[in-house]
Image (cartoon, rainbow, N blue to C red):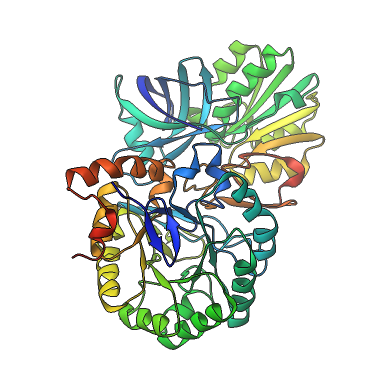
Amino acid sequence: MKEVKFTVSSNVEIALNTWKMVLKGDTSAIKGSGQFVEISLPGFFLRRPISVNDATEGTLTLVYKVVGKGTDMMSGLSEGATLDILTGLGHGFHPEACATDALLLGGGVGTAPLYLLARELIAAGKAVTVVLGFNKSEEAMLVEDFKALGARVEIATMDGSLGTKGFVTDILAKGGIQYDHFYGCGPLPMLKAVCAGIEGKGEISLEERMGCGCGICYGCTCHTTEGPRRVCADGPVFDKEVIVW
Amino acid sequence: MVTEVNLCGVRLANPVVPASGTFGFGLEMAGEYDINVLGGISLKGTTREARFGNECPRIAECPDGMINSVGLQNPGIDVLTSQKLPALRKVYSGAIIANISGFAPDEYRECCAKASAAPEVDIIEVNISCPNVHGGGLAFGTSAKAAAEITAIAKEVSDKPVFIKLSPNVTDIVEIARACEDAGADGLTLINTLLGMRIDIARRRPVVANRYGGFSGRAVFPVALRMVNQVAHACHIPVMGCGGVASAEDVIEMMMAGATAVQVGAENLRNPYVCKQIIEDLPGVMERLHIDDINEIIATV
């Protein structure tokens, strides 16, 4: 964990109510995909936990959905704005757990942290298939970014306006995707449905309303087969097998 | 310049103590900065058996504060004494305050006895004011008779100083404080959180799954200050002031109101480094206010 002052270098709407913010600052505490940051916003008591979409030396990219007053304020920030951010929070994905073929499953803005994961996997020579689910085509995000990395992308939308009509699980049900390890991030009902039907080993990223984001308040605890675990500090990424739904 | 304070014979290098429930079991932050700067640490509330606590969501944002309904998640007193306390003592030499909660007098008796027997524990803080569990905690803290009963039990089994942590959710906090003092309490901690609520107006339901939760953060500071002031002038035992403290100036203000030590709670959740920063700021603020010895300001207002 590291508290860092970042400067916004761009902040644009990339899909319906979904924004991509690129920030400049010290990213050294961010160890890999699946971690998150906590953003302090003026006028709000608690920080906002946002997943890391991408991180390189000196540049942090966040993709976030406007769901409340805090994220609404974030969407209004322009180039040059400064933000106090706690970086390098949580335990992320394990790209090394994949032998040859990875399956990445994203739902809505849960797609965001899968980008850095895909980049890590492809850099390590793994084949990556990304299956994304959205309500409608206007909400689809990062599709071209995944393709640019060299990932195969399949999309499901609830209204059928893009890709397969239905859920991520409907694409999985069709079969034909080769993978030895899967990674998921999205709304809880989606993750639950995925984990109920999917074969093989994998890990998912949970989200919860958080207090501290760094393991001291026990405000975001989930049930696991190993007992109560803090989503912020023990997770947010957990092995599929340990989650108690 | 003197920042050391004395709580019933336990010396704290400075009056700053992270409050129970906002600093885990101390070890969580040990990797982030040298926690030995802290005057003391009040550990997460502990019960006889391990508890999951309430379902999530447990947290709600409020203006200048927050609501929590964690509900006393903890690994149980035996894990505290066998694992958490020895691990913390290895890296922390300051005052360790074990915070004990329960659902029945016997549970308080057993947990206080075990905490007292633990060599790492310097002070026992008995929580009779948790608003987040049904049938326990707060039920003992809203009646002078029950508060006195739990105090007497804790004192009976404890060799360590016993502080009773009081609830602000009462008609007359002085009456409860006096009942605890009369029953033998060595000190008092106040205030615990104020019972509160937020509603998600889009979903038309409470934000926290447990419906209500404890409200804390900067917004409660004036309430905490007032209650500390009332209790400090009515009782003759030391008070640890708690509620909305966010700066070295707040620490001074809380001590002028009557606190001998000052706990920092919800602020840790927005700024995990705040206790360290307050301790660093304290000498400068004292100098500016011409305070040579921090003890000279206690209960001067």
Is the C terminus of chain B in the top left, top right, bottom left or bottom right quadrant?
bottom left
Question: In the picture shown, does residue A6 fall above or below B256?
Answer: above
Give the left or right position of residue A23, taking residue A104 as reference: left
Find residue A3 and report its horizontal and vertical position in percent. 43, 31
Label tally: 0
In front: A178, or A138?
A178
In front: A59, or B17?
B17
In front: A104, or B181?
B181
Find residue B220 and report its horizontal and vertical position in percent. 30, 60
The residue at the point 47 percent across, 48 percent down is A211
The residue at the point 43 percent across, 57 percent down is B11
Question: In the picture shown, does residue B167 fall above or below A199?
Answer: below
The residue at the point 44 percent across, 88 percent down is B145
Question: In the picture shown, does residue B289 fall above or below A31?
Answer: below
The single residue placed furthest to the bottom in the displayed view is B145
Give the left or right position of residue B97, taking residue A181 as reference: left
Find residue B70 and report its horizontal and vertical position in percent. 52, 59
Find residue B125 and report its horizontal and vertical position in percent. 49, 67
In front: B261, or B77?
B261
* Residue A123 seen in this snapshot: yes
* Residue A43 seen in this snapshot: no
Give the left or right position of residue A122, taking residue B44 as reference: right
